[in-house]
Image (cartoon, grey):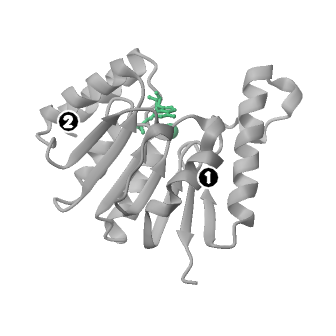
Amino acid sequence: MDHRIEEMEEYAILHHVPIMEHDGINFLLDYIKTHHIRRILELGTAIGYSAIRMCLVDPNITVTTIERDRKRYEKAICNIQKFGLENRITVLFQDAFDVELNDTFDLIFIDAAKSQYIKFFEKFEKNLSQNGVIVSDNLNFHGLVHTDEMALSRNVRGMVRKLNQYIDFLKSNSYYETTIYDIGDGVGISVRKDI
Ligand code: SAH
Ligand code: MG
């Protein structure tokens, strides 16, 4: 394994940055590879870990990724430079809700604030290519989505409720075929149907 990747993983543990779990990222990278994904939009860069790993799947991949936290944004820029990927990864230091994009993407990866997933989906689906896919991370929210609500703190309960609403939203959205995989922290794959 590339020491630069391990370095990011260690930084994430040390600084409590919620980067994708191993099984989850491997599953996503495999999906990107087998489906020949080229243009990716990511909501929630953090330190650039998933953006870099997705980019490394194929030299033709480009990633646009959005992060609103200055410290993480700066760390991401630094990590991306270490890999020499600054020409293929564009990091926007902005709140995703303030970003207006005209480009279309083969894959949109939603991994920002968990309570806003429906809003992210609705805002960015216009940027999804014809047969594009929307991938959502943390649908299990550390296993808590399947926990008895009363055992959770008020804050966490609210988040879990929102994620469950999002899962219902995905399942009932007839424009997409959604499968939720119990891999990593729960990964949703929503493929736009040909209609
Ligand atoms: N995708 C990363 C992890 C992202 S963690 C990886 O797996 O490596 C989620 C990040 O989303 C956090 O850094 C947080 O600051 C950012 N975020 C949350 N809400 C956001 C918003 N509305 N706009 C931009 N970034 C947001
Ligand atoms: Mg995540």
> Left or right: 143 with respect to 31?
right
> Left or right: 13 with respect to 115?
left
Query: Which mark is drawn over residue 80?
Result: 2
Q: Residue furthest top?
A: 14
Disc 1 crowd rating (10 Å Cα; few below 14, some 14-19, many 20+) is some
Q: Residue furthest bottom?
A: 195
Q: Quadrant of residue 28?
A: bottom left
Taking the spot 62% from the left edge, 64% from the top edge, the residue there is 179
Q: Quadrant of residue 32?
A: bottom left
Task: Identify which amino acid the numbered label 1 is placed on.
Answer: Asp
> Left or right: 173 with respect to 126?
right
Rendered view: 13 above or below 22: above
Q: Quadrant of residue 83?
A: top left
Quarter of the image with the N terminus is top left
Quarter of the image with the C terminus is bottom right
Asked whether disc 1 touches disc 2, contact meaning CB atoms under 8 Å apart, the reply is no
Query: Which mark is drawn over residue 182?
Result: 1
The percent position of residue 107, horizontal first and vertical second, equals 41, 60
Query: Which mark is drawn over residue 141?
Result: none
The first of marks 1 and 2 along the sequence is 2
Identify which residue, 8 or 39, lies in the foreground.
39
Taking the spot 62% from the left edge, 46% from the top edge, the residue there is 119
Taking the spot 23% from the left edge, 30% from the top edge, the residue there is 77
Distance of label 1 from label 2 (alpha carbons)? 29 Å
- Say how many tags the image has: 2
Circle 1 SS class: loop
Rendered view: 98 above or below 39: above
